[in-house]
Amino acid sequence: MLPKMRALVVLAVLQLPLSYSQGCLSKQQVANTIRQMQKLLSSHEAAQLQSLRNLKKQLTVMQGNVHKHSAKRNESCSLLPAPLNGRRLGKKMAVGHEVHFVCDLGFFLVGSETRVCLENQTWSGQQPSCKNWVTLSNSSFHRQPRCADNPLGSRQCSCDTGFQMRAGGLCQDVDECQIFQSSRHSRICAHECVNVPGSYRCTCPEGYQLQTDKNTCNDVDECAENHHNCSRSQTCVNTFGGFRCVRPECPKAQLNTSYVKTSALPAVAEDTPGLDDLMASSAEQGDILSASRFPGSLALPPGCWDNPNSLLCLPQPFALAKGFMSALTSTQLLPSYRQCERSPCPMDSKACQRAAYSISFHYVPLQSSRPVPRVLFKMSTSHFVGDSLRFAILGGNAQGKLVVQRSDRHTGELVLTRPVVGPTTLEAELEMSEYAQKVLLGKHIFKVTVFVSQYEF
């Protein structure tokens, strides 16, 4: 309506001069004005139609999103409540996902420890509850003995397992926690011990699950089970009793030196089977990922330069990291969560040419108060171009606790020299340099972060 009203107003204004003898418009001028108004009306009409089409598309998209959201909700189970005096582990409610339940210290679980969302949108098992051992009446820890008369006329009495005869003829509960748990060498529970009539119960802290032996605690891998709150731009790193969200970044460009993100490199546990195969495989693949270009080789692959008789390429470094993922010492395969490779250097930039060819980030979980000395991390190359490797600590926050030493001609080790009480985080920036006749061929930076747990298991 608004364009039509504007047109009528303009026409009325145009008609006014026609009644006067002076300043009258010619018929041609009036015709041109009418054509202009028609074009104006057509353009307004086209814009209005386009707006309506866009609005219709937006409504269609919104309707589709609503249907998708409804469909997703239909494929999920209802939210399960956490038991009183306990916790629910797991946020995913979609079909096929699991949730776990644990009780607070002093309580034990009755019901299903794990429940799965089934295809019919119902949960398996029974809703658990947490019962309090502490509130058991004192009478539960005292029992009448079992007595029987023998053929000789005397009376013999005995107590049930876990009870001991006391003065007065009553069977008194044996407090296993008080007897054994106080000593480090005789303790019966890895974490906390709760005395119950005739026996005891072991409990684990948050982030752990009680093992089938009912004594030791096993770390829950929140990252593998997707029980974490890390964003998409972050990487979840499992630690003992929890997890960390990390987001390693390549250094910012400076002095003609810049880095780009590349694929992650493997980091292999020092006693992982197949290490020799990995080294051979790396050598066969060319090993040019970690190096950059040398002066006069801008047209060559990264990490390669002209030799009088051949083309030489620096080997790809790899890291050997040792972790401890249970109450017993074990090893695990630890990835490098980010690899940064140096961009080609300008031919006249010595600062760029002296910079590290690649930077990788590694994360090592560690229990509190581990025995020392302890090798946490190893670094090496699959093969040499030069004649020697040098290893050094460039920086970090673990002075006096971490040192670098050479285990053989090809390998350097990051060693923990003092016991560390958690929770705390140790950081070390390591450098591995390769030389040929005392001339630097290239170097790699390993940024190692050690997450020390507050627990010793």
Image (cartoon, rainbow, N blue to C red):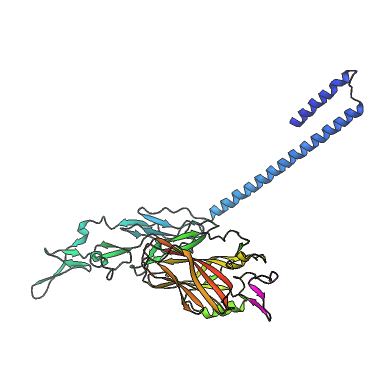
Q: From the top left corner, tell me how far across and down residue 254 is, in percent.
A: 60, 59
Q: Residue furthest left?
A: 153
Is 165 magenta? The answer is no
Residue 435 in the image: above or below residue 118: below
The mark tally for this picture is 0
Q: Residue furthest bottom?
A: 309
Q: From the top left corner, tell me how far across and down residue 429 is, in percent.
A: 49, 66
Residue 270 in the image: above or below residue 139: below
Quadrant placement of the N terminus:
top right
Boundaries of the magenta span: 297-312
Q: Residue furthest top?
A: 20
Residue sitting nearer the eye, 451 or 102? 451
Residue sitting nearer the eye, 112 or 196? 196
Residue 163 in the image: above or below residue 66: below
Q: Is residue 96 something one can see in this rendering? A: no
Q: Residue at x 57, y 51 (%)?
A: 69
Q: Is residue 89 something one can see in this rendering? A: yes
Q: Residue at x 68, y 80 (%)?
A: 308
Residue 29 position by quadrant: top right
Q: From the top left corner, tell me how far across and down residue 53 is, in percent.
A: 72, 43
Is 310 magenta? The answer is yes
Q: From the top left corner, tell me how far across and down residue 163 is, in percent.
A: 20, 66
Our reading of the magenta stretch's main secondary structure is loop
Q: Is residue 365 left or right of residue 61?
A: left
Q: Is residue 70 left or right of residue 403?
A: right
Q: Residue at x 21, y 65 (%)?
A: 174
Residue 240 position by quadrant: bottom left
Quadrant placement of the C terminus:
bottom left
